[in-house]
Image (spheres, helix red, strand yellow):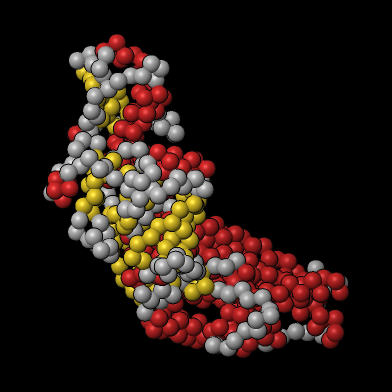
Amino acid sequence: MLDFPTWKKFWLWGLTFVAVLAAMPSLFAAANVEWPEALPNPQVNLGLDLAGGSHILLEADPAEVAAQRLENMEETVRGEMRRAEPRIRIGDISTSGGALSFMLDTPADIDRARGLLEPVMMGTNLVREWDLTVVDGQRMVLTPTDDGVNQAVTDAMDSATEVVRKRIDGLGTREPTIIRQGDTRIVVQVPGLQDPDQLKELLGKTAKLEFKLVDLNALPTDVQAGIVPPGTQAFPYSDETPQAGQMVAVRRLGGIRGDSLTNAQAGVNPQNNENVVNIQFDQQGASKFCTLSTENVDRPFAIILDEKVISAPNFNEPICGGSAQISGTFTAQSAADLAIALNSGALPVELTVIEERTVSAELGADSIRKGLLAMLIGSIAVVALMIATYGRFGIYATIALVFNVLIILGIMAGLNTTLTLPGIAGFVITVGAAVDANVLINERIREERKRGRRVVAAVENGYKEASRAIYDANITNFIAGVLLFLFGSGPVRGFAVVLVVGLFTSVFTALVLTRMWVAGWLRAKRPNDINV
């Protein structure tokens, strides 16, 4: 039990040294001392409550998801009927009342149309998303089911959460907290970001990019009044364009959506030095864009971003290389933000900021000072009590306590975790748990000495018997910490991380390191008695 061969000592000291070395960059940063660039630089990230930053609560409108589903289904229905052999002719499609209905020109096509639509009414999760009914033997009505709507909202929010995460990562921030709250809300916390305006603008931008042909048959006067022919939509020019306030009529179907993009990058047009965004389509999008541009040379098309026209150039020639350029009245920053938004994908639903708050860096620094002060006072009191009560063994416990804190910092830095104010509370609890293990060991050694055992036997049995109680106590704490991490969020998770890591390091320092030190002292001094 007290036998520590040389290789084992080197292994334990090497493990401890690596963990302590990993903690050094964080300590240097806390002391505002520059860490050498040539060395690895793992650091513990500070949470919103310590580093300051921005907190934003976003909310989506489920009605928008339902409207988008109706539009997608309309395009699907038209495509299926057009591709049928022979073609199934239908009249205008209505989306009033939240249902999609259309009239067949030939009642005999009912069965064929039903057979084409049945497969598309089932969702990817084997949820029936639409109900199909036939009215008067000729009109078909597709009604969204409750399960389908709920699944669509869930999918949209999951996708929106991932898009938000990609956009924030594009800002270069570290360790943001992005979680779902309820059915239609997303909580975003970005430590270190003191200006929430850029974040709000980026997250509030749907980045729904569309390329649609301008309808030249629409009368300009009617378009400005919002009157457009069937199958046509009117969109306003962006406020940043010279045509702000004017409307453009475009064909509602048959365009290209931004989900065909594979890359977007801000740049400068060398011909006029304007800020632009260069985009790249995937294979399918490149083919559609090539076909659209080839069939409509010398015709204008509108580039629509978030339902506002940012440009309406002509197809001067076919564009078949899969690349295109979005120009407008961009600044360098707005072009970069648009590129981030496009690269992260369009939000499937518009998100509205319903709550925001900013934690100042000064408040975070004050939280750190108070947390560290509480930890320092508690540690000094514990150290004084341990040394006064257990003498040399209390000194070993104190040294182990210092190593324990450094190892926790090193592991957290290596795992790139975030330290929050509750995490500091976890540190304080870990200090108590580490000392508690040493108290159990030392008290057990006292009992063994009172029973008349020799020094070495008392120490060996003390560590052996106390380790059982230490393991049992830490296993129960470990279970609680894991449950807090799995079911908690934000600061609760920060507390759980420090707690769980601290359990392992406490057992290591209390049962392994101190035992190695005690064994070395016993071999060197061979005392006849010990003051425990």
State the residue in front, 387 or 480.
Answer: 480
Circle count: 0
Q: Measured from the top left, where is residue 407 in percent x and y?
A: 64, 74
Q: Is residue 360 above or below residue 308?
A: below
Q: Is residue 115 above or below residue 70?
A: above
- Comparing 24 with 423, the one in front is 24
Q: Residue at x 67, y 62 (%)?
A: 468
Q: Is residue 426 visible?
A: no
**Corner quadrant of residue 273:** bottom left
* In-front residue for pair 531/74: 74
Q: Is residue 273 left or right of residue 394?
A: left
Q: Which residue is painted at 85% across and 81% down in the image?
A: 523
**391 relative to 206, above or below:** below
Residue 344 point in image, percent of width and height: 45, 56
Residue 519 in picture, x, y percent from top left: 80, 77
User: Looking at the image, which residue is at 76% across and 74% down?
Assistant: 14
